[in-house]
Image (cartoon, coloured by chain):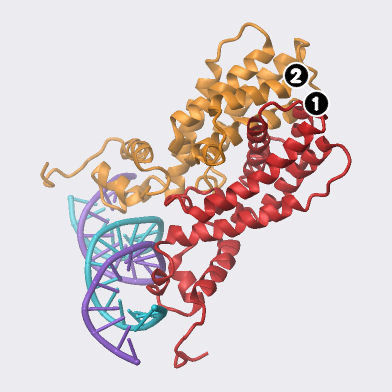
Chain colours: A orange, B red, C purple, D cyan
Amino acid sequence: MSSRHRYHHGDLRRALTDAALALVGERGPKGFSLTEVARRAGVSAAAPYRHFTDKADLLATVATLGFRQLRAALEAVPEGGDERERLVRMGRCYVRWALDHPDFYLVMFGSDSKQPEHTELVRAAEDAFRVLLDAISAAGSSGVLHVEDPHRWAGSLWSVVHGTATLAIGRDLQHTGITTPAEDLAALTIGALLR
Amino acid sequence: MSSRHRYHHGDLRRALTDAALALVGERGPKGFSLTEVARRAGVSAAAPYRHFTDKADLLATVATLGFRQLRAALEAVPEGGDERERLVRMGRCYVRWALDHPDFYLVMFGSDSKQPEHTELVRAAEDAFRVLLDAISAAGSSGVLHVEDPHRWAGSLWSVVHGTATLAIGRDLQHTGITTPAEDLAALTIGALLR
DNA sequence: ACCTGAACACCGTTCAAGT
DNA sequence: ACCTGAACACCGTTCAAGT
């Protein structure tokens, strides 16, 4: 309570990322301030610079955690049934995750994050992407889908779910009179795409 | 050159939006500062508040102009041939426009703009959306495409082009090894979708 | 090695005061 | 009616100085 306790954090880096995660959830990528993160961790505004090169670096770390969470969610999509149906379920899962963590999602794809080609971030994003890629390859080799270029298919599906998610988060779908829930819209689009 | 000329703008509002347009093009939605816009227009930092309620209000004005430009580009897509082919061409046009004006595009869909439910912005966005909607309806009534809910189809196509465009702008496609140019990817996706 | 305190340059926004 | 100047609260970042 009093400031006579000098903060001797065992792991300030961890405390800062935790605070950053919470702050992003509360105020979004907008209104996110490094100073506020430091304040919440109980340290001076200069302290974070001992652990992160930059505000962008801290945001990139947050984004990395986001991609890992998203990957875990996608991996948890049950197998079984038609491989095409699984792709539809994965699309639903992707959009649902994005809408459940809108600010998180915006940080992950915000231009703030990937300035310094943050290695871990790129890897985490690739890992999440690979889940989608594998599901497509599975559909291809099971013969239920004609796949010559998995990457191209993955690009198509990713565009669909990312586009649907971001338009939904920005309320653009509603503004233009699209009443279909985002998750259903993505599922319908993917279904048509794989037909 | 000297500051003894007191600026007696006939249309400061216009000068500010012009400066804002240029600044967005130079520095992107990031690094965009109201103070800098005022500086470029040759007025004090407080002057813009006589013409815009907010920084967000000025950005919303910029976004509005963007949607009008995009709409014009989409309307210029030639008719003729299969109506499905026209939808593919419109998709190409959309993605090309976005990649030609990436910062502009990010402002249009950035969360900064649509805080105050800016009326003109919403209308401009709707107008652009309607071009897509009309093209879909045309394909429906010509019988080349089975359309029961044009809005749902429009939502699908919009998700595809918006998703492709934003992933391309953020370099996410390249980072994940998708070598197909964004414009081609969108065209292929839409083609598969309408088949 | 890690953190503080003070400093710097920069914002967005408000408001009295000028013309 | 429109703009300036000064002010306020807030940033991100740097750096000498403390422990």
The answer to whether the residues at label 2 and label 1 have Cβ atoms under 8 Å apart is: yes
The circle on residue A195 is: 2
Badge 2 and badge 1 both on one subunit: no
Question: What residue is pinned by disc 1?
Answer: B195
Q: Residues within 10 Å of mark 2 (few under 14, many from 20)?
A: few
The circle on residue B9 is: none
Q: Position of residue A68 (x, y in %)?
A: 50, 28
Amino acid type at circle 1 is Arg
Quadrant for the C terminus of chain B in the image: top right
Q: Is residue B12 above or below residue B73?
A: below
Q: Is residue A62 above or below residue B29?
A: above
Can I make out residue A53 in this image?
Answer: no
Disc 1 on helix, strand or loop?
loop
Q: To which quarter of the image does residue A176 belong? A: top right
Q: Position of residue B29 (x, y in %)?
A: 52, 56
Q: To which quarter of the image does residue C11 belong? A: bottom left
Left/right placement of residue B73 relative to residue A122 reads right
Q: Considering depth in this image, is B128 or A69 the residue closer to the camera?
A: B128
Q: Chain of mark 1?
A: B
Residue at 53% across, 53% down? B121
Disc 2 on helix, strand or loop?
loop
Q: Considering depth in this image, is A127 or B126 the residue closer to the camera?
A: B126
Residue at 54% across, 43% down? A118
Q: Chain of mark 2?
A: A
